[in-house]
Amino acid sequence: MKNKPDFSIFYSLEFLNLQRESASRNPYWGKFISPDQSIIHEFSSEYNHPQSNHSPKIIDFTPYRKNNPLFDAIVDRISLDESAKNYYRCSAKYYADCFNLLTQHEKKINRIVEVGTGWGDLSCFFAGSLEAMDATLDLVDSNPEALLRTYVKIKKNFPEAAQKVRLFFGDLPLYVKHVSSKSPHISLIHYQGSYNFNDVIRDLGATYYAKDKIVGTMIHGTHIRSTDMCSYAFTDVAIYALFGASVQFVKLGEESNAEMELNSSQQPFTYLATSRVDGMYLPYSNNHFRYPHPDTLLEAFFEKNVVPVANSH
Amino acid sequence: MYILKHGLIREGRKNPEWGKFISPDIELQDMQDPNEKLNVYIPSGNKADFTPFLQQNPAFDAVVKRIVAQRDLMSYEEQCSGKYYFDCFTILHSLKGKINRVAEIGTYLGGASCIFAGCVTSLNIELDLIEANKEFLLYTYERIRRAFPEAVAKVRLFLGDMPSYIKNVVQHEKQTNILLHHDAGHNFNQVVNDLACLYFVKDKIQGLMIQDTHLRSAKIQNYIFVDAAVFAIFGFNVKFLQFGAMYPQSTTPAYAGKTYFLDNHAEGFYIPLDQNKFQYPHASMTLEQIDTVV
């Protein structure tokens, strides 16, 4: 149904900051991890059988078929995976839009960076495009289990792509520091790392330091709001803070005109701010950063939150 | 840098006086400088330059004259631009007859408070000062008492933050029409909390003036984005007036907070509530929910 928010989508509102804090004590934090080593068992004994905490979701790709044979082939292969329907996080239009955006960048990029892999739903679309795009896929997540289950899923559905996939256990600022800024690759980023304002500021703000090697960032859940006061889910507002009010973007996914209707199928409840879309694509060449300040160093993104002492103006 | 003190509210809530009106400290009256007792740290002693805005409005000139008379006697500083104070005065006067109170959230050393206090009698309004730091509140009151003694009968001091003021005071009142001035915590989450409270008393609020919408911190973890919080609450189609100073180039990050002003960005926003809709909080949320988040 058009202009009706899709309430069967589960949005994770967990605090990336908290997750990061515990993950950063792991010796593999900020490094590529190998799915072929025994460490995968240290992270999770269940990674081969991920348990989803939300109900199966059938999404209909039919309206987006017959435009691109590769897209159809990817959908066909994903549809063979019985468990796939358990892990869709986005609308069919969103997957189709991301795919189309990716293919528009053929020969302009040679790497896809997916931050926040969740259950590997979108990752499969990227993985299925790697050969045609002549690109590699770096998965970035602060949850190693998410990385590993996503890898397993890719290997199951697109075994030929697995060798082009790397798993970076960390967050986007670390990835920018250790990978993007040191590598000649030109990347397209997909960000679904967090919907929390501060997290998005910190993660996408760090891409400033590799902006010449990034064609743009696709961001999911820009319209999500939560009735939990502590979630501060304001992704689109963070994009404003980083790129200013005149930010240029392409809409991704479904558009909603519903008046702040609650999705009560999950706790805390979420709703969609009016006239918002599933996501936004920000082409970096058409935008400029209003934050961070040009004098700020990337290292500032790794400083701990120190409560300033009174009288220390 | 008090606007960065995340722990201030949490500490303040432990005080039994928190969330209530308090009495002024009469001992301050006999001191040459109230800071002899209060010992408030004054970082720069900077004063606003009102000169370019004089001789445009005799009422403003009269208020400034009485403020400036205190300058050599007291140790305060003013952190807003002269234009900001002038614009606040103009906005306030444009609402003459429509409001019966100015509520100022975050007074610091009374820079804006004195402008408002100077209008209390002529506009026949009350002035509620809301501050999480008791010393600031007492200092501000004493500054007002000296410059505008005729106004103090209309001035109340509330020790608390915006959620506690809305919850304990505004929510229980009838026939109040308030012009709010917000210059409290500048952290995005804190400003969202504060402004979200307005939803529950929106019929009693004429409008909101909010300061430091152009401020940023080069310390990432400070998350100073006051303007972004306005958009989070009212959406990107918010109808607002930009006022105060605007700088052609970003300033250099300074002080412990590494704060700076963003270029081509207004120092303050005025948001008339009757022309805007809330995008946040959701109707299912409660004031209690917000007041308990600190």
Image (cartoon, rainbow, N blue to C red):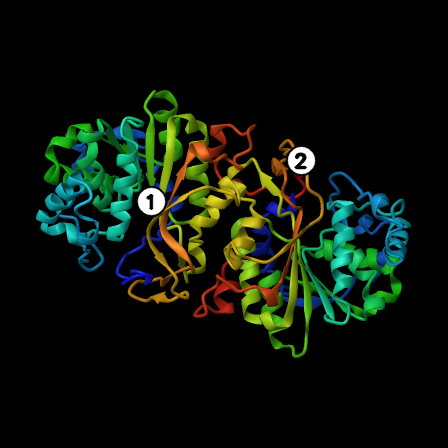
Q: Position of residue B209 (x, y in %)?
A: 67, 57
Chain name for mark 2: B
Drawn side of residue B265 relative to residue A65, left or right? right
- The numbered dot on residue B248 is 2
Local secondary structure at mark 1: loop
In this view, the residue farthest toward the front is A67
> Compared to B115, does B221 lie above or below?
above
Quarter of the image holding residue B152?
bottom right
Amino acid type of the residue tagged 1 in the rendering: Gln
> Compared to A266, does B219 lie above or below?
above
Out of B178 and B275, give the one closest to the viewer.
B275
The reply to whether callout 1 and callout 2 are in contact (CB within 8 Å) is no
- The numbered dot on residue A192 is 1
Residue at position x 87%, y 61% in the image: B148
Residue at position x 60%, y 47% in the image: B5
> Compared to B44, does B106 lie above or below?
below
